Image: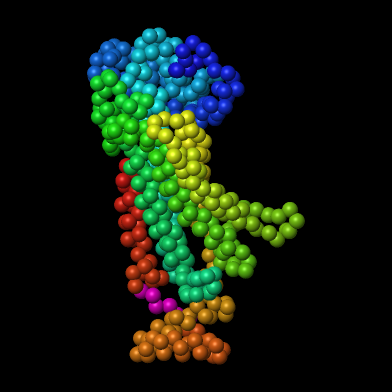
Amino acid sequence: MKLWSKGFEPDKMIENFTVGRDRELDLQLARYDVEGSMAHIRMLESIGLLKREELDVLLEALADIAAVIERGEFTIEDGVEDVHSQVEFMLTARLGDIGKKIHSGRSRNDQVLVDLKLFMRDKLRDIASATGRLFDTLISLSDKHRDVLMPGYTHLQVAMPSSFGLWFGAYAESLADDMQMLLAAYNVANQNPLGSAAGYGSSFPLDREMTTRLLGFADLHYNVVAAQMSRGKTERAASMAIASIASTLGRLAMDVCMWMCQNFGFVTFPDELTTGSSIMPHKKNPDVFEIMRGKCNRLQSVPNEIALLTANLPLGYNRDLQLLKDIIFPAVSEIIECLDMATFMLPQMKVRADILDDPRYDYLFTVEEVNRLVLDGMPFREAYKKVGQEVQQGTYSPVKEVHHTHLGSISNPANDRISAKFHNILKNFEL
């Protein structure tokens, strides 16, 4: 049962190879296929290709299919190629010839395009929401631990004083940058390709602006060839945004793994949030953050995988594009899972408040001493030399006080401004 059937069936081995996992993945597109079909037939009725009574019965039947999908009872039957075929065959079985009219002015090419645009638009909103939850958690923890000092590092060498407030807040603001990329991907997805048919338009007088309004798209892919070329571009933009978030989250996970190590001992988690060893009874392993780091590292390869899949494809639809779903669908689920896990774990982290009492961190305060001498009138290079000599001679004695008051520093982290920046981006997702 195929929409393109002309009275013959392909070899079973050919069918299995070309269909691949499409039937399984297409279940995620079912609700969007119905939504797109409802908009399409309303437009067909407006240009005289459907009668009003035909539209009414089609809308009723599609609403019933939507209810089946909502209940989780929708399946793609054996022998049916994809979700588009399943929906149309269900309509035809119920309504006869009226069901066969639904495909007028449409190709599976623009049908799957609109399904994917609607799917990606929703999933990018879901990622934005999950990112927002983690952002708010990080800002809250930054405020809570604002005055708890910790070592700052460069080259993984003890450098200058930092704080847990700065650490949490840094990852929060990094997510604000990631959200800019997510918003760009959202804007690419939020364009209507319906009416481009197989990529070259239609001789029917389709009202593409009407379907744009009905489906709530912000804009239209006007050029029908450009609409078809957007297949792969939307997924690539989304994958780059996902990879950007994954980069931030993967670095945070690495920090947590390192801070939990006994050689640092900066943070701990409740026993039930860690795992153990089959041979070493003392172990409390940061497996959650190691898995998170691994998943995020893998997610950063997704843009390259999509780029290689779509590189130098000739103009128009090519079956290679079907494989995009195998790549981007799991990536969407995985980044949301990682974001939600980080949001769950981080509030249960216990931070050490006395880290800098350890003499190994005495040299963190050398810059503070240089700056104090400069404020007292000594030229910077002379102050730098003086403190450097004290360090070399072993006579340096730290004054463990920090006076960082400028915007974005330890005592003035600007979390209110970071929050405003983030939420100004978030509101563009129309959540």
- Using the rendered image of the protein, determine whether residue 334 is visible from the camera's viewpoint: yes
Left or right of residue 83, residue 285 in this image: right
Could one spot residue 130 in this view of the protein? no
Q: Residue furthest right?
A: 279
Image spot of residue 399 (x, y percent): 47, 84
Task: Please state the horizontal and vertical placement of residue 398, each as a whole percent of the image.
Answer: 50, 84
402 falls in the magenta region: yes
Q: Which residue is drawn at 46% across and 88% down?
A: 385
- Predominant SS along the magenta part: loop
Query: Residue 413 appears at what percent x and percent y?
Result: 38, 66
Can you say whether 284 is above or below 368 in the image?
above
User: Which residue: 27% across, 17% down?
Assistant: 45
Q: In front here: 70 or 213?
A: 213
Is residue 209 left or right of 182 when viewed as pictured? left
Give the residues in magenta. Answer: 400-405
Q: How is the image coloured?
A: rainbow
What residue is drawn where x is 46% and y is 69%?
Answer: 163
Name the one closer to the observer, 175 or 2. Answer: 2
